[in-house]
Image (cartoon, rainbow, N blue to C red):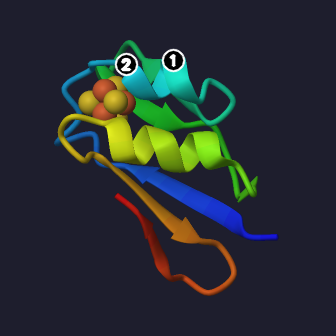
Amino acid sequence: MPRYDAEVDSRVCTGARLCTAIAPMAFTFDEAMFASVVRGGPFADDEAVVHAAQTCPVEAITVTDADTGEHVAP
Ligand code: SF4
């Protein structure tokens, strides 16, 4: 079962908040930065994290396999 790490590039994030709607267990919104941030991780086999990275309109989220480092999404 894969485990995922997620990163948000706050310089790219536009604050659309799709990620916090799709995967609220993984992402939260930092009002000070006006950007999404990752709550923690790694996340066990959570397709919502992958879906959030694929849905982010500016590709600010990068998901990697926590064990291999392999790029997963977007
Ligand atoms: S979906 Fe992308 S642009 Fe929107 S808040 Fe999340 S990281 Fe930022």
- Residue 42 horizontal/vertical position (percent): 71, 58
- Image quarter in which the N terminus is found: bottom right
Residue at which label 1 appears: 21
User: In the rendered structure, which amino acid carries the disc numbered 2?
Assistant: Arg
The reply to whether dot 1 and dot 2 touch (C-beta < 8 Å) is yes
Question: Left or right: 53 with respect to 22?
Answer: left
Q: In the image shown, does 35 or 4 lie closer to the viewer?
A: 4
Question: Left or right: 15 with respect to 53?
Answer: left
- Residue 27 horizontal/vertical position (percent): 55, 31
State whether residue 43 is above or below residue 11: below
- Identified at 34% across, 37% down, the residue is 55
Q: In the image shown, does 30 or 1 lie closer to the viewer?
A: 1
Residue at which label 2 appears: 17
User: Is the CB of mark 1 within 8 Å of ligand 1?
Assistant: no
User: In the rendered structure, which amino acid carries the disc numbered 1?
Assistant: Ala
- Residue 24 horizontal/vertical position (percent): 62, 24
- Identified at 75% across, 57% down, the residue is 45
Question: Left or right: 28 with respect to 35?
Answer: right
- Secondary element under disc 2, as helix, strand or loop, is loop
Question: Left or right: 43 with respect to 6?
Answer: right
State whether residue 59 is above or below residue 35: below
State whether residue 10 is above or below residue 21: below
Task: Indicate the quadrant of ligand 1 in the picture.
Answer: top left
- Identified at 27% across, 40% down, the residue is 10
- Image quarter in which the C terminus is found: bottom left
Q: Alpha carbon of mark 1 to alpha carbon of mark 2: how far? A: 7 Å
* Crowd class of label 2 (few under 14; some 14 to 19; many from 20; radius 10 Å): some
User: Is the CB of mark 2 within 8 Å of ligand 1?
Assistant: yes
- Secondary element under disc 1, as helix, strand or loop, is helix
Q: Hey, which residue is sitting farthest top in the picture?
A: 31
Tally of numbered discs: 2
